[in-house]
Image: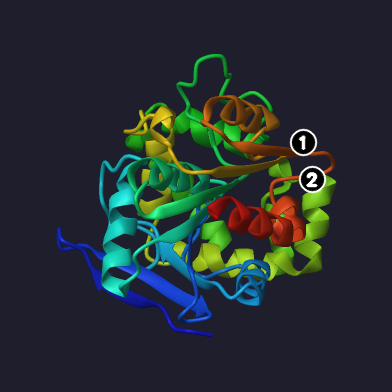
């Protein structure tokens, strides 16, 4: 597996990234969930490689070896992605985001329209101030606690995340389902037992190894204005959401499906937050490639 690398951004921050798959193939930039890091899921890496894609993964600001960008908004991911593309000599790319990565992928669709050819959103979070959406309804208990504290600000949220970090950074993959019990329907538990837990635990542990800053800033960014309008998205978008999801409830997917211009949306019966990407990644990438032209 490739080792993580660092690129220095214009403002002096460092951005951690990895490149997998076909090194001269079309690029797919993937935005990880919350918390997470640049370590990729095996299902994603295999699906990308089998389609001749060059998979580029990053650790968002504050995660892993990436420098913190305190006060960042969701839109900031687009500028960081653009700078990374410049550093790698990549003119255009496909963009994907899972869970907390979904809004950041949408930001690229809005602000990198000349370079992002198509966007894939997997169980992505909707804006907290979305008109006609109750942001918290349908979430599991742990997310209700987390986002409730995020709405109160950093001082209220940080102690909660520090406690969660201590539990996650020492957990074995087989312990992950128990640590996330209030957020997992049976279909997601089965996905973890089938091997996803190893990748997810490694991704989270790397992301929070040096602290909770990335996780904290993600949560605060989700409950604040994102810094761009969904109306700005001018590239084809594929959206996938499971109807059993307790992390990002189905209502978020339905709301985004009604708001993102020209989106091709899939509300998958019987799928959860984790299972949908673990089991349907081949279909997702095939559609993303078709939409990209």
**Crowdedness of circle 2 by 10 Å Cα count: few (<14), some, many (20+)?**
many
The label on residue 243 is 1
Residue occupying image coordinates x 15% and y 58%? 11
Q: Split into 4 quadrants, where in the image is the N terminus?
A: bottom right
Residue occupying image coordinates x 49% and y 21%? 130
- Residue 207 position, x and y percent, is 45, 63
Identify the secondary structure beneath mark 1: loop
Q: CA distance from mark 1 to mark 2?
A: 6 Å
Residue 34 seen in this snapshot: no
Q: Upstream in the sequence, badge 1 or badge 2?
A: 1
Residue occupying image coordinates x 59% and y 76%? 52
Identify the secondary structure beneath mark 2: loop
Residue 117, above or below 253: below
The reply to whether callout 1 and callout 2 are in contact (CB within 8 Å) is: yes
- Residue 256 position, x and y percent, is 57, 30
The label on residue 271 is 2
Residue 125, above or below 88: above
Q: Residue furthest left?
A: 11
State the image quarter where residue 222 is shown. Answer: top left
**Crowdedness of circle 1 by 10 Å Cα count: few (<14), some, many (20+)?**
some
The label on residue 102 is none
Front residue of 89/146: it is 89
- Residue 190 position, x and y percent, is 83, 57
Residue 72, above or below 167: above
Residue 24 seen in this snapshot: yes
Residue 64, above or below 71: below
User: On the picture, is 4 further left or further right than 11?
Assistant: right
- Residue 43 position, x and y percent, is 68, 68
């Amino acid at each position: 597996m490739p080792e993580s690398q660092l690129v220095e951004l214009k403002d002096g921050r460092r951005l951690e990234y990895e490149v997998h798959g076909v090194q001269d193939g079309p690029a797919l930039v993937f935005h990880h969930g919350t918390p997470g890091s640049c370590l990729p899921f095996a299902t994603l890496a295999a699906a990308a490689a089998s389609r001749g894609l060059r998979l580029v993964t990053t650790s968002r600001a504050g995660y892993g070896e990436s420098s913190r960008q305190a006060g960042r908004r969701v839109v900031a991911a687009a500028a960081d992605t653009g700078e990374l593309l410049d550093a790698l000599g990549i003119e255009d790319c496909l963009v994907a985001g899972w869970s907390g990565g979904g809004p950041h992928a949408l930001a690229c669709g809005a602000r990198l329209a000349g370079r992002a050819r198509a966007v894939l959103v997997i169980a992505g979070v909707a804006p907290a101030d979305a008109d006609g959406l109750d942001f918290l309804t349908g979430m599991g208990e742990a997310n209700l606690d987390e986002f409730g504290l995020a709405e109160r600000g950093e001082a209220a949220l940080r102690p909660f995340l520090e406690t969660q970090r201590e539990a996650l950074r020492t957990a074995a993959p087989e312990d992950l389902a128990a640590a996330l019990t209030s957020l997992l329907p049976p279909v997601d538990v089965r996905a973890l037992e089938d091997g996803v837990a190893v990748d997810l635990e490694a991704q989270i542990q790397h992301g929070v190894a040096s602290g909770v800053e990335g996780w904290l800033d993600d949560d605060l960014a989700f409950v604040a204005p994102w810094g761009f309008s969904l109306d700005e998205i001018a590239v084809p978008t594929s959206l996938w959401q499971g109807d059993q999801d307790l992390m990002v409830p189905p209502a978020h997917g339905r709301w985004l499906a009604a708001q993102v211009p020209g989106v091709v949306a899939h509300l998958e019966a019987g799928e959860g937050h984790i299972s949908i990407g673990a089991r349907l990644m081949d279909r997702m990438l095939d559609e993303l490639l078709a939409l990209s032209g």
